[in-house]
Structures are given as structure tokens and as C-alpha cells.
Amino acid sequence: MKRFQYFIESRAFGVCTMLGEKLGIASSSIRLSFIYVSFLTMGSPVIIYLMLAFWMNVQKSLRRERSTVWDL
């Protein structure tokens, strides 16, 4: 089950896990809240999720170390 969870997290941007770590809340409760709110609001939190995923991707690319000549 842990392998499946890791696979889903690595492919689904890890937004809920990141929020859980920042806020000190279990990521499973964040996921459930996201699902419930998405059903109640007809999917509008998906836009917020995608914006957070984009922002996380930008942060990763900015923090990535530059490769040197010796890394080739």
C-alpha cells in the first residue's frame, strides 16, 4: 500500500503532502477535505490545486543546483 501511495504522490504533484507538512496536518485529511469541497463547489478547487502544483514545480526548478562541467 505504501508503494501505491508513493506512486500516486509522485505522479500527482504532492500538493496535499506539501500542505500537510507546512501546516502540520495529516495529508489524508487534506485530501478528503479537498475531495469534499470539490464535490460541493463543482470542482473549483481543482484550479487552486493546479496553481499550487505549478508553483511547486517552479520552486523545484529554481532550487535545482546548476550542473557543472564535471557533472557530464
Image (spheres, helix red, strand yellow):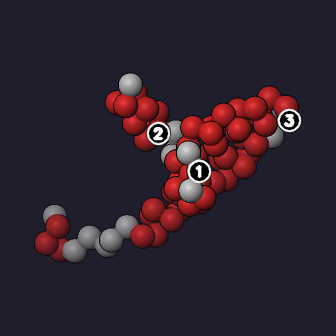
- For numbered disc 1, what is the local secondary structure? loop
Instruction: Indicate the position of residue 30 as horizontal and vertical percent values.
Output: 64, 43
Q: Which residue is mark 1?
A: 25
The circle drawn on residue 41 is 3
For the residues carrying marks 1 and 3, which lies nearer the camera in this image? 1
Are the residues tagged 3 and 2 within 8 Å (C-beta)? no
Can you say whether 70 is above or below 8 in the image? below
Which is nearer the eye, 65 or 23?
A: 23
Residue at image point 62% right, 39% down: 29
Q: Give amino acid for label 1.
A: Ile
Q: Is residue 8 left or right of residue 30?
A: left
For the residues carrying marks 1 and 2, which lies nearer the camera in this image? 1
Locate the C terminus and report the quarter of the image it occupies: bottom left
Q: Is residue 48 left or right of residue 54?
A: right
Locate the N terminus and report the quarter of the image it occupies: top left
The circle drawn on residue 9 is 2
Q: Quadrant of residue 55?
A: bottom right
Q: Is residue 1 left or right of residue 56?
A: left
- For numbered disc 2, what is the local secondary structure? helix
Which is nearer the eye, 55 or 31?
A: 31
Q: Give amino acid for label 3.
A: Thr
